[in-house]
Amino acid sequence: MSNDPLLQPYQLKHLTLRNRIIVTAHEPAYPEDGLPKERYRAYTVERAKGGVAMTMTAGSAAVSKDSPPVFNNLLAYKDEIVPWIREMTDAVHEEGAAIMIQLTHLGRRTRWDKGEWLPVVAPSHHREASHRAFPKKIEDWDIERIIKDFADAAERMKAGGMDGVELEAYGHLIDQFASPLTNELDGPYGGSLDNRMRFCFDVLKAIRARVGDDFILGVRYTADECLPGGTGKEEGLEISKRLKQSGLIDYLNVIRGHIDTDAGLTDVIPIQGMANSPHLDFAGEIRAATNFPTFHAAKIPDVATARHAIASGKVDMVGMTRAHMTDPHIVRKIIEKREEDIRPCVGANYCLDRIYQGGAAYCIHNAATGRELTMPHSIAKADRRKKVVIIGAGPAGLEAARVAGERGHEVVVFEAANDPGGQIRLTAQSERRREMISIIDWRMSQCEKLGVTFHFNSWAEADTVQAENPDVVIIATGGLPHTEVLSKGNELVVSAWDIISGDVKPGTNVLIFDDAGDHAGLQAAEFIAKAGGKVEIMTPDRSFAPEVMAMNLVPYMRSLQKLDVTFTVTYRLEAVEKSGNELVAHVGSDYGGIAKQRTFDQIVINHGTIPLDDLYFELKPASSNLGEVLHDQLIAGRTQTAWRNADGKFQLFRIGDAVAARNTHAAIYDALRLVKDI
């Protein structure tokens, strides 16, 4: 038996959990018709295979039709969900893990124009800032109906083989009853804490009456809303004690904060550049005060922090949820004493930001997550060893090198720079994005173990590549900033990269024209503003930085607003000309009828990248496939067989931004799905 605190079993009522690490409830947005079909099941089972003690699905599954998910959630009010739940729970149990599901009624945290277009209900008419729906004040018959819906849904989940259900309280309807900020009811469900808690206890009693005592029941709730007039720490502690004393639940899952705004949500679930485990000590206080099984998760990305959480007795079960999206095999690697092989969560939050924007969850640097039906988490050996030459050691090139090395190929990488990383090394210059460099460091470590040969400070020419006698050549040279976007004056502007890298000194009165909408524009703005410059960010779009997405935008806004940066939307920079020591910006609009002139001392363009593809086109005539990628084979996961040149000596491919400007995830996905079949 290991002495590692994380590997000790834990007895939760009748349920023996094999270790202390859980995946807390989250909705990856993989359901089909609100049901956990093959893709959802494969994703969930992979974490069970990796050794986690318990995985919780849904975040959260809707119990009522007037709780329509604003993104693709499970629909626990459907009877037809039961057999799909059963297939998933059976598969998870076969791997030795427990499985629970989180149930909710969203209350005001949704929209009336989703699902069946039913009115949103809440204990007041106050809308939630994030979802903007003005709710109907809930009536007595609504309350009765929703309590029954919770019980019905829990009964379905038990019939589907779940080990238990967790109620999502914080930010959702249960919490909207509990918080004095959102409960304006009179009578039995409003006013005193007793009355505000009544709805929660009525739901718990109804569920317990249906599922019996041999079923785990827990609540994920806020014990401190961190809002003036809301549930404070003292009242939160009282709520915690009352939940325990009710005898209705088996554990507490504690969070701190509120999720009604993007900023509040980001403080509850911090991203890169923010402190790790910011609420762990608070959860420990609740655990000490209640002496009751306590779970907690909030940016606990590494094994050392998780181990401390358990060893110090702060919590009984520690959630590493986003970490398991990055590497589903964390526990197995701990058991095998291979912690250095754990793929690190870098807190980029690409997963959650995609969900909140209506997409499916993908990890920024594990392209197999959410694609378990088609992409491998573990790379199989190739039938025949080949020589693979890769040009470029950015995220695409390093992923190609890693996967080719895992396949057993001889791999050689040429990189023009002193160090690996490409655009990630550049973006990591920003303090808030420093964690991104772990994407590179982990791949370099894996490549070194696999015997990959690197040539840095090596500008590869066509002759250099062909002298290696390769079987496969992969161009991963990335791109260069594209600033040639003006009708006049392109030579007068600089790129966002120039500012971030320090190659160009920031000006004092600066316009950043950003129609790429990614991190580089905001990073450049922050660099300049912190250096004392006056900054205006202009975009032709109706919102700025749309590629950064909601939660990643929060830390930028907190910084840039304090620095008095100006944001101007719906205007386009058309031309620039020099006037003495000043630059005159000619500004128009895609909407027409506008022609303005503005004066600055520096103008920065952020318009993405243009492929650095000269080497690809030099090598193309000598390749057997002439660079062709057969998309059907790529999508189906089959070896590329294009043959267009009988005299060709090698296959040639290009990936990442060497093809077109995209993002880190796209670059890594390009590499994985191509090279896994070489």
Image (cartoon, helix red, strand yellow):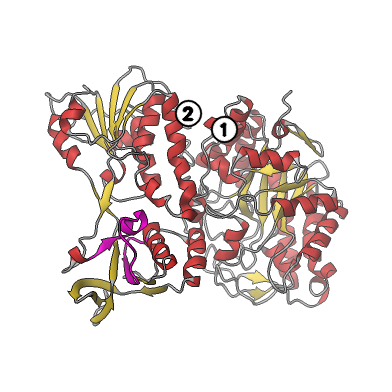
Q: Quadrant of residue 488?
A: bottom left
Q: Is residue 161 visible?
A: no
Residue 505: within the magenta?
yes
Location of residue 338 in the rendering, given as x and y in whole percent from the top left corner = 57, 27
The residue lying at 51 percent from left, 46 percent from top is 346
* Residue 428 sits above or below residue 92 on the image: below
| 109, 383: nearer the viewer | 383
Q: Are marks 2 and 1 in contact (CB under 8 Å)?
A: yes
Name the side, left or right, on which 258 lies relative to 644.
right
Q: Is residue 134 visible?
A: yes
Nearer the N terminus, badge 2 or badge 1?
1
The residue lying at 40 percent from left, 57 percent from top is 519
Magenta region, residue range = 493-517
* Residue 87 sits above or below residue 198 on the image: above
The residue lying at 79 percent from left, 78 percent from top is 186
Q: Amino acid at mark 2?
A: Ser
| 385, 243: nearer the viewer | 385
Residue located beneath label 2 in the image: 378
* Residue 260 sits above or below residue 28 on the image: below
Helix, strand or loop at disc 1? loop
| 645, 209: nearer the viewer | 645
Location of residue 339 in the rendering, given as x and y in whole percent from the top left corner = 58, 31
Location of residue 123 in the rendering, given as x and y in whole percent from the top left corner = 70, 72
Name the side, left or right, on which 457 lies relative to 398.
left
Q: Quadrant of the C terminus?
A: top left
Q: Amino acid at mark 1?
A: His
Residues packed near mark 1 inside 10 Å, few (<14), some (14 to 19) or many (20 plus)? many
Location of residue 668 in the rendering, given as x and y in whole percent from the top left corner = 38, 40
Q: Quadrant of the N terminus?
A: top right
Residue located beneath label 1 in the image: 329
Residue 267: within the magenta?
no
